[in-house]
Image (cartoon, rainbow, N blue to C red):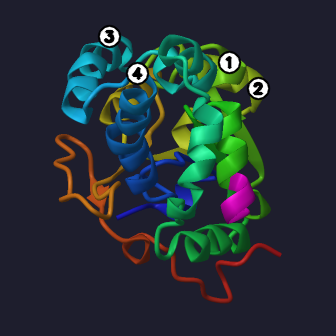
Amino acid sequence: MLDWNNINTVLLDMDGTLLDLHFDSYFWQKYVPQRYAFTRGLDIPTAERLLAPIFKQHEGTLNWYCLDFWTRELDLDIAELKRDVAHLIAIKPGALEFLQRLRQLGKRCVLVTNAHQDSLALKLEHTRLDNHLDEIISAHQLGLPKEDPNFWGELQKHTAYTPQLTLLIDDNLHALRTAQQFGIKHLLAACHPDSQQPKHHTDEFVSFHEFEEITPVIDSQSIPR
């Protein structure tokens, strides 16, 4: 599926790719409406109905991923609420083994996430993914989400990479499309971001379900010396 001989940098999404998206799905679709309803004396269906257009308005923008923005917008301490359900944060099966194998092969592994710094810190605290990565970059450092076509050029200013020798693994099809427009050659879609939901259709992109499907096999000749 992947030509590892022509890949030297692997850009990895976090939520829905390395981590189970169930934490985020539950938080935004269930827990936030519950807390919003409680603080305003509403029933939950009414809270969901009020929140839906607000969420829709900011989908795909940097605000969508910004905990500070939602704290102001909803008058809820979003970072603190995330800690309430942090027990749901989970690494995808096989993800750590995949990262370890890439490091053995000498591939540079860079986490590139839209997650806000507070959300990122919470997830690293619970998973220690940072121990398996060469670099971690949040879209908030760049001021653009991955859905923006200018993101990938800005990323190069923060961490040098050659698009023709780079693999992006992501569950966000819009992000994969902007990366493709920029010239990133190797693109792979995670088709089962949320373990509690059905698999996604990944349209024009090659996809994988489990990490073991894409984990490279190592022999003595493939290990850098």
Q: Are marks 2 and 3 in contact (CB under 8 Å)?
A: no
Name which residue type carries label 3.
Answer: Gln
Q: Earlier in the sequence, mark 4 or mark 3?
A: 4
Name which residue type carries label 2.
Answer: His
Residue 224 versus residue 43: which sits nearer the camera?
Answer: 43
Q: Earlier in the sequence, mark 1 or mark 3?
A: 3
- Residue at the spot of label 4: 40
Residue 174 versus residue 177: which sits nearer the camera?
Answer: 174
Label 2: which secondary element: helix
Q: Earlier in the sequence, mark 1 or mark 4?
A: 4
Q: Are marks 1 and 2 in contact (CB under 8 Å)?
A: yes
Query: Between tags 4 and 3, which lies in front?
Result: 4
* Percent x, y of residue 182: 46, 22
Residues in magenta, as a range: 124-128
* Percent x, y of residue 28: 39, 37
For residue 57, which numbered disc appears in the image? 3
